[in-house]
Structures are given as C-alpha cells and as structure tokens.
Image (tube, rainbow, N blue to C red):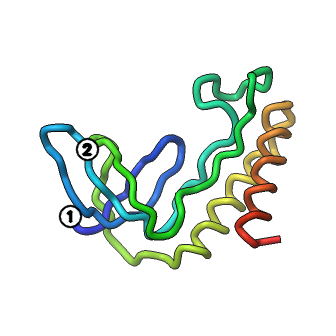
Amino acid sequence: MKYVRAFYKTGVYIAELMERQENMQRALVKVLAVLKHPIQGDLHHPKMIDVPLFHQRKALAHFEKTWVSLSSLKPYEGEVPEYKSSLLQAIDEQQKVLQQDETEWAKASLEKLNECKSEYGFN
C-alpha cells in the first residue's frame, strides 16, 4: 500500500505511506492531495458557536508529514490529483454545503473557510 486515504482530525487526504508503527497503532504519512477540507470551529463542540474560540482550521500542507492512526488509513487506488487544485475543489465543495445551511454555525464556518481560502492564495 503506497498511497493511502488518510483521515486526520476532520480532514481527508491522499497521502504517501512513509512508515508504519504497528506497536503504537500509527503511521507516518506525507500529504499529496486534499479530499475533504477540515471542518471549521471547535473539534470538541462540533457545530456549536458559543465556544471560547471558534477555530480556523486549515488543511495540512503539501508534503506535510503527520502521524495518523492505522485505523484511519484506507488504500487509495487511482491517480493522485495535483495538491493545489484538490485543495480548491475541497474548499468549494465545503462552501456549497455551508451555503445551504442557514445556522449561525454555518455562517461562522463559511467566514473562517473564506479566510483560509484567501490565505491559501485563491482570492
């Protein structure tokens, strides 16, 4: 299994499997593309707006290495898309979903996601 679909926090990535540590139930992966952009806000209080800090959550960077649990890995078959275009597609998909949601959480998430998009250089 060279390429994997790796889940990290609330994002999903196509990554290269670098190292497995069976005894610690984790794997080191190198990010190649973004399939799902991380959800904005507080991970411990999902979809809540009245939290001490409503976080801006960015996607892992191109070639960034991170440890993920072995249980979060799935084999990835197929062509690996270019990182920047996959990131833009993941953001656009999440924006479309948030624009259909009229809750305060969705509005705050959309604002944070737009900040991310601008910081990525897409605006």
Cα distance between the residues tagged 1 and 2: 15 Å
Left or right of 68: which side holds 96? right
Taking depth in this image into account, of 93 and 68 the one nearest to the observer is 68
| Between discs 1 and 2, the one toward the N terminus | 1
> The disc labelled 2 sits on which kind of residue?
Arg
For this view, does 111 lie left or right of residue 61?
right
Residue at left offset 42%, top offset 75%: 80
Where residue 2 appears, as percent x and y from the top left, is 24, 68
What residue would you read off at disc 1?
1
As shown in the figure, which amino acid type bears the numbered disc 1? Met
Q: x and y percent of residue 55 in the render?
A: 70, 38
> Looking at the picture, does residue 107 appear above or below residue 58?
above
- Name the quarter where the N terminus is drawn: bottom left
Q: Nearer the viewer, residue 37 or 56?
A: 56
Q: Residue furthest left?
A: 23
Query: Residue at point 26% right, 50% down?
Result: 27
Quadrant into which the C terminus falls: bottom right
Secondary structure of residue under mark 2: strand
Residue identifier under label 2 = 26
In percent of width and height, residue 11 lies at: 53, 49
- Within 10 Å of the Cα at label 1, are there few (<14), some (14-19), or many (20+) other Cα atoms? few
